[in-house]
Image (cartoon, helix red, strand yellow):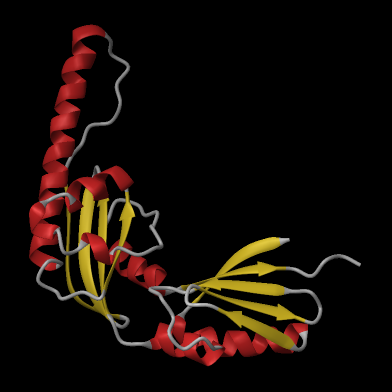
Amino acid sequence: MTRIVSVAPARLERWLAGFTERHGVTSYDVTPSRLTAAAEDGSRADIDVPFGPLEDLTPAGLVAHVLADRRLGLLLVRRGGYGAGVFEGSALVASKVGSRHVQGTTKAGGWSQQRFARRRDNQAREAFAAATEVAVRILAPARLDVLVCGGDRKAIDTVLEDPRLKELAPLVRPPFLGVADPKQKVLEQAGVDARAVRIQLTDPPEQ
């Protein structure tokens, strides 16, 4: 059985020690993009290096890597809202969230449906334009080390196509976050989720 667990960066060292305590002597295979821990009982933990590549190819090196100070930008865009934030470590040092009304679906047909579709598309464009202006104001001057995005992929692509944000696109790293319409609390939680270390756990084979 395989499952995913998320661990805060500050807890990773203890989690790795606990893995050995629970499953026995553990060997490590570490590359710039992944750490694999294989225990003597057959259990395995795979960790994709967040914000890689990893330079010190050891478990301790991975712990130091996830704890490193970095300026992380967050861009969340959905049809109904948007948010941008800058984190230094776990501290949110700059942010802005907003919303735009975009109508839902309709069962009307004919010309009414076409007018509705045009109106909805216009509202979505206005929402994405507002999201772009916030990204330009909050993220573009922030000297980010990494950018994590979430919400609607097409909306994110639309925002990042703006020439004023051309330096941000190369900074985008996983994960891509699934979020509700961005409010302040959603933005703050997304910052926690963006920094979390994701671990794929594989249970030992059944005897």
Q: Quadrant of residue 37?
A: bottom right
Position in image of residue 179 (x %, y %): 36, 54
- Which residue is more in the foreground, 72 or 93? 72
Quadrant that contains the C terminus? bottom right
How far across and how far down the image is residue 24, in percent?
77, 87
Q: Residue furthest right?
A: 207
User: Image height check: is 117 above or below 42?
Assistant: above
Residue appearing at x 32%, y 17% in the figure:
107
Residue drawn where x is 73% and y is 61% of the image:
1
Farthest residue, direction top:
110
Displayed quadrant of residue 184: bottom left
102 displayed left or right of 53: left
Q: Is residue 143 above or below residue 10?
A: above
- The answer to whether 23 is drawn above or below residue 199 in the figure is below
Residue 151 percent location from the top left of the image: 32, 51
Q: Residue at x 75, y 68 (%)?
A: 203
Can residue 27 be seen? yes
From the viewer's perspective, tell me whether residue 31 is left or right of residue 201: left
Total numbered labels: 0
From where the camera sits, is residue 78 visible? no
Image x and y of residue 159, in percent: 18, 50
Position of 7 with respect to 91 (left or right) is: right
Task: Identify whether 202 is placed above or below 176.
Answer: below
Point 14% across, 38% down: residue: 125
**Which corner quadrant of the image does residue 149 belong to?**
bottom left
Q: Nearer the viewer, residue 48 or 15?
A: 48
